[in-house]
Image (spheres, grey):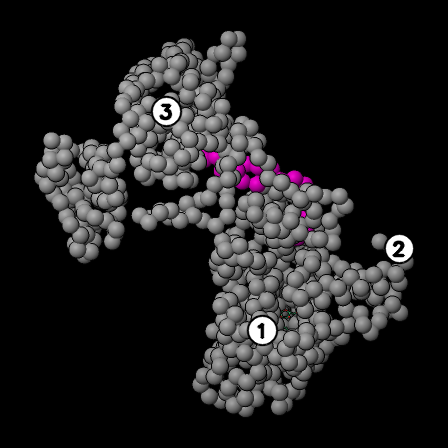
Amino acid sequence: MSRNPAQRAAELRAELAEHNYRYHVLDDASIPDADYDALMCELVALETEHPELQTEDSPTQRVGATASRDFAEVVHDIPMLSLNNAFDDTSAEDDAARFATIGDFVRRIENTLGLSEPEFSVEPKLDGLAISLRYENGLFVRGATRGDGAKGEDVTSNLRTVKTIPLRLRGSGWPAQLEVRGEVYMPRAAFEAYNAKARESGEKVLANPRNGAAGSLRQKDAQETAKRPLAFYAYAVYLPATPEQNLGERHSAALAQLRDWGFPVAPEASTAQGFAGLIAYYRRIGERRDHLPYDIDGVVYKLDDYAGQRTMGFVSRAPRWAIAHKFPAQEQSTELLDIEIQIGRTGAATPVARLRPVQVAGVTVSNVTLHNADQIARLDMRLGDWVIVRRAGDVIPEIVKVIPEKRPAGTQPWQFPDRCPVCDAVLVRVQKVKKQTKAGIEYEEGVALVCSGGLFCPAQRKEAIFHFAARRAMDIEGLGGEIIDDMVELPFLRDGEASRCLRSPADLYALRLDDLTELRRLGQERSGSVPETVKKGKVPTRWAENLLDAIEKSRSTTLERFLFALGIRDVGESTAKALARWFGNLDAVMAATLDELRAIPDVGPVVAGRIVAFFAETHNRDVIAALRAAGVQWPDAEPQRIAQGVLAGKTVVLTGTLEALSRDEAKEKLEALGAKVSGSVSKKTDFVVAGPGAGSKLEKAAELGLEVWDEERLLGFLAEQSS
Ligand code: IVH
């Protein structure tokens, strides 16, 4: 930074001019608004202190940048001016000091007009794009952007696509010529939906709703604009034939009139009395900011009485009768310190950006979850970069872009690691399944990385053990969520001299009563309640004995249950069953190649890949060996490479109460014949088995004209198949 004021002013002018051009002409803001405002404040201060430094082309002397040449030029009969901004002094002790600028603003009006506590029109300050709409004899004839305030761009055909802009006025009594001004904006939900879609199809995402609105209005093809969900709110009105006159006496009444003529006006627009009224409004809207359906960057106070406005007049670029009271910025820049990989309970590897902590809209942000590796590559985020962080509404903070100008020298593109940072197993690229139909599997766009450490990875351990013990897997009764949490977190197992936590399901088979006693003691100690009986060493042992029994019982299982229990990604019960039948023994499954696996009906290339990756991981093989060594066993069988069961490809729904069979038994028997048993009735259902008490599913089946079986028919059919 230069110390010489003249040099610094020139520097600031050049920098602001460049940002202005990027923001207004290219719709590609290079810095967050808050940083821009800070530069502008610095220049205004310098020029106030040294008036001789002010130049005609200083950005303090005008409103925006010049119009681009792509659209016809519109000269604004009444210039589109800007508002002065007021920021809070957050270090201040009381409201008077905190809101000093607002105090000065109100006092100046009171003193000039000789009033006390004047009435203001108070409105949200929408974060979109200012536009001007011309109506002649009640018809919309021309719409323009603000441009530099004197000249804008003719975007009439694009504005016609904005559904909330009236093309013809309602009611009557409107003047022959009318100019209405307001903000075109993109509602938050529409912005999120647009970006979700763009992300999925790999298109450019919008940095924020304001950019979305600006970019959409500047489309050369109005059909494109029409696809973007834009909206409009009116906040000002002029009479071009008699510019010195206003529509009525008061601004709030003019807004009400506009509403009657069919213009949307922000529902939060209201009136308030004097300084205290303004601050109360600021606080009220501030509290609701996160829940509004659109982005706002502050509130606007306007002297309500038009005659008073005329007396107050303007100073250079802004009215003296209005001011924008800004909220803390929703975008801030900060430094990207690191990108770490977090492994979720299902093994999904999620990159998380560690940032130099920064206040964004009143909240300190230091970690931001990134969507996936694609986002890092798309934005070309590198360690040491300055990035723009955005936090708007209830939406979690996001990194919207990198500031290329601030990139330090010598940075390298970031590379996704190829191993799990927790267990060092290979990270495999997987596509998330979007929906699975008879025709095949549909995948989501983009890939996710998943740790293949499965049973061993500490990050996945709880989930893996929970799944292992589940009823349809190893069926260890009594081994549920909380006990597993304790087992994985508390050092209850004696390992020589030391103690340790449960590392893999194989450890379950070595548990003794003492271990469980210790587990209970540690658990109660941690939760702060140690019952007397425990202190005296007398522990209720029934639950522990029952658990040990259940573990013991699970030692004898079936190959398909065991395969399912391993928790191989996308290997559900039916795939586990298919594998068990096809190969007959575990060694054959573990040794199977991709091609061998793909030969099995119902095993597609993706699932085959997951199976091979799982068994290739040493940790997983070790856990399996340990389980077998601990005595977990099942009967092997002859491989059954038969094609398919009689119900292959059929989808069946069970509903109501069955008497001779439990639902699970019926399901198992139907699946053994190749059927898919589903929980909901749809067009794709082949038949429904309904017992007494069947309700909505049976109704739906009747509606769709599906075949319905009673239990007797099911039993008859099953008997026929097994004979
Ligand atoms: S009145 C002469 N009212 O804020 C006063 N402006 O710097 C003209 N804005 O570009 C503006 N909400 O796009 C006014 N309720 C509101 C507003 C509003 C947003 C924007 C407007 C303008 C900027 C003022």
The foreground one among 411 and 288 is 411
Q: Residue at x 84, y 53 (%)?
A: 1
The amino acid type found where label 2 is placed reads Arg
Side of 347 relative to 31 (left or right): left
Q: CA distance from mark 1 to mark 2?
A: 45 Å
The residue lying at 71 percent from left, 71 percent from top is: 65
Q: Which residues are magenta?
A: 332-351
Question: x, y percentage for residue 203?
Answer: 54, 57
The residue tagged 1 is 220
Pointers 3 and 2 in contact (C-beta within 8 Å): no
Which amino acid type is marked by label 1? Lys
Viewer-nearest residue: 639 or 603: 639
Give the side of residue 557 with respect to residue 723, left or right. Answer: right
Mark 1 vs mark 2, foreground winner is 1
> Can see residue 75?
yes
Residue in the picture at 53% in, 62% down? 294
Residue 349 magenta-highlighted: yes
The residue closer to the viewer here, 194 or 140, is 194
Total of numbered circles in the picture?
Answer: 3
What secondary structure is found at the residue carrying circle 3?
helix
Label 1, secondary structure: give it: loop
Mark 1 vs mark 3: in front: 3
- Crowd around label 2: few <14 · some 14–19 · many ≥20 (10 Å): few
- Location of mark 2 (residue): 3
Mark earlier in primary sequence (3, 2):
2
The residue that appears at 44% across and 36% down in the rendered structure is 609
Q: Which residue is mark 3?
A: 588
Q: Main secondary structure of the magenta part?
A: strand
